[in-house]
Image (tube, rainbow, N blue to C red):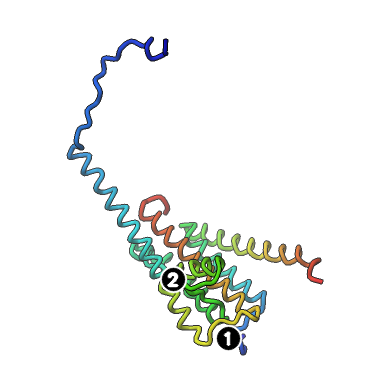
Amino acid sequence: MTEDAQLPPSNDPVPPSLPPTGAEVESVEPVLRRELRSWTFAIAGWLIPGLGHALQKMWGRAAIVFSAVGLLVFTGASMRGNVFASNGGDAFDTLGYIADLGTGCFYFVARALETAGADVSHSQGDYGTRFLATAGVLNILAALHAYEAARGRKA
Amino acid sequence: MSGGHGLSLTHIQAFLVFAAIISIAFGYLGRRRPNDRLRYILWSFFLFLAVGVGIAWAMYPFSR
């Protein structure tokens, strides 16, 4: 005899799957709208560093993110660091490309600044490559922060 | 600072510039109040320096 068979029969009716009430629809809609808004801020922050925070009127953070990413990109490109392209030969090139893409529009600024191309035969170029990759990762971090702030999770 | 290979920074200069920029960005993103930010920036900068110099000394025996 199983355990279920020993239990007395329940008188509770099986809850029918009713359509959501008007109040439930109203509570779901702002959540979706907020989620969409948060993603918009995150993508805006990725494309133009600091924009995700500026749209939320976090001016100080917006200015700092823009300046930090810009300075890192400018320094990295001036040191003739490697700005990776999409046609990388191995996994490290692909990872570098993803990191560099994190800078959003500054990726194209870095490419424009490096008219003479990368030179990683000297330590300067190697440092520059790290500066550029760090700029991308920092901007992705800032975009995620803008997303979290829009969701109300971070101040 | 400018040489034949674009902007030319020594290792320690590049290290200090990097640590300063990242510390300031972390401070602004991670903290809200000005005092907390300043403390976080200084602490983060100090840790960058401590870890960098620590790793440099740890590698010293293998450099020769």
**Measuring 53% from the left and 84% from the top, which residue is drawn there?**
A117
Task: Give the spatial CA distance, label 2 vs label 1.
Answer: 23 Å
Both marks 2 and 1 on one chain: no
Asked if residue A24 is positioned above or below residue A4 in the image, the reply reads below
**Residue B11 percent across, percent down from the top left:** 67, 75
Q: Quadrant of the C terminus of chain B?
A: bottom right
Q: Nearer the viewer, residue A153 or A59?
A: A153
Q: Secondary structure at mark 1?
A: strand
Residue furthest to the bottom: B4
Asked if residue B10 is positioned above or below residue A2 in the image, the reply reads below
Asked if residue B43 is positioned above or below residue B12 in the image, the reply reads above
Q: Chain of mark 2?
A: A
Residue furthest to the left: A22
Q: Chain of mark 1?
A: B
**Measuring 42% from the left and 13% from the top, which residue is drawn there?**
A2
Q: Residues within 10 Å of mark 2 (few under 14, many from 20)?
A: many
Q: Nearer the viewer, residue B61 or A97?
A: A97
Q: Which mark is residue A122?
A: none
Q: Is residue B23 left or right of residue A109?
A: right
The residue pinned by badge 1 equals B6
**Measuring 42% from the left and 10% from the top, which residue is drawn there?**
A1
Using the rendered view, name the quadrant where residue B49 is placed: bottom right
Q: Secondary structure at mark 2?
A: helix
The residue pinned by badge 2 equals A66
Q: Is residue A154 left or right of residue A76?
A: left
**Measuring 38% from the left and 9% from the top, which residue is drawn there?**
A6
Using the rendered view, name the quadrant where residue A3 is placed: top left
